[in-house]
Image (spheres, rainbow, N blue to C red):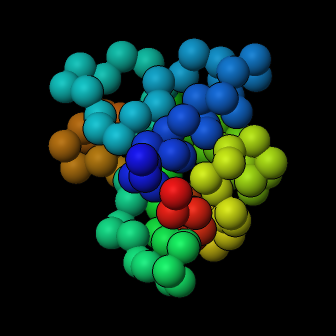
Amino acid sequence: MMRHPSAIVVSCLKRWLKGSEFDGVYVATKVPDELNGPMVRVDAAAPDRETPVTDRTRIMLQVYGTDDEYCVDLLSACLEGMEVSYRAEGDILDWDTDTDPYIFPDPDRPSAVRWQGAGTLWTALS
């Protein structure tokens, strides 16, 4: 059964952050109504069938945290995890970070600190 690229990234980041200084950070595709503590939101554009057996998907990683430095550190860790993800996640063929962390205010949560980074994910269709 084929998993959606955003689900693959959520799984990959949870595994990557486990045992790190960011162990236990909430990783999901939706921000909960009550945002308690830091989190990583995985947002994906529609997958594009690149070949009969691969999809290419634009992935945005949005990080909520206590301050700018924390957000940049967490987002950098996530981007690093995606860079080496093909070694740990069978569905991932490649990742290319093309947008380094930048501040990305959340209009629905004006007091929240949010940063974003992005890249392109290639996944195998199984």
In the rendered image, the vertical position of residue 81 relative to residue 45, given as above or below: above
Q: Residue 11 at x, y = what percent? A: 54, 35
In the rendered image, the vertical position of residue 116 relative to residue 45, given as above or below: above
Between residue 119 and residue 74, name the one nearer to us: 119
Question: Is 37 left or right of 81, judged from the image as shown?
Answer: left
Q: Residue 13 at x, y = what percent? A: 60, 37
Residue lying at 68% horizontally and 63% vertically, measured from the top left = 93
Residue lying at 54% horizontally and 72% vertically, measured from the top left = 54
Residue lying at 61% horizontally and 53% vertically, measured from the top left = 91
In the rendered image, the vertical position of residue 100 relative to residue 113, given as above or below: below
Between residue 34 and residue 15, name the one nearer to us: 15
Q: Residue 65 at x, y = what percent? A: 49, 31
The number of numbered badges drawn on the structure is 0
Q: Quadrant of residue 81?
A: top right
Q: Quadrant of residue 19?
A: top right
Is residue 69 shown to the viewer in this render? no
Residue found farthest to the bottom: 51
In the rendered image, the vertical position of residue 82 relative to residue 40, given as above or below: below
Question: Is 30 left or right of 91, judged from the image as shown?
Answer: left
Q: Residue 55 at x, y = what percent? A: 49, 72
Residue lying at 53% horizontally and 83% vertically, measured from the top left = 51
Is residue 19 shown to the viewer in this render? yes
Question: Is 112 left or right of 109, judged from the image as shown?
Answer: right
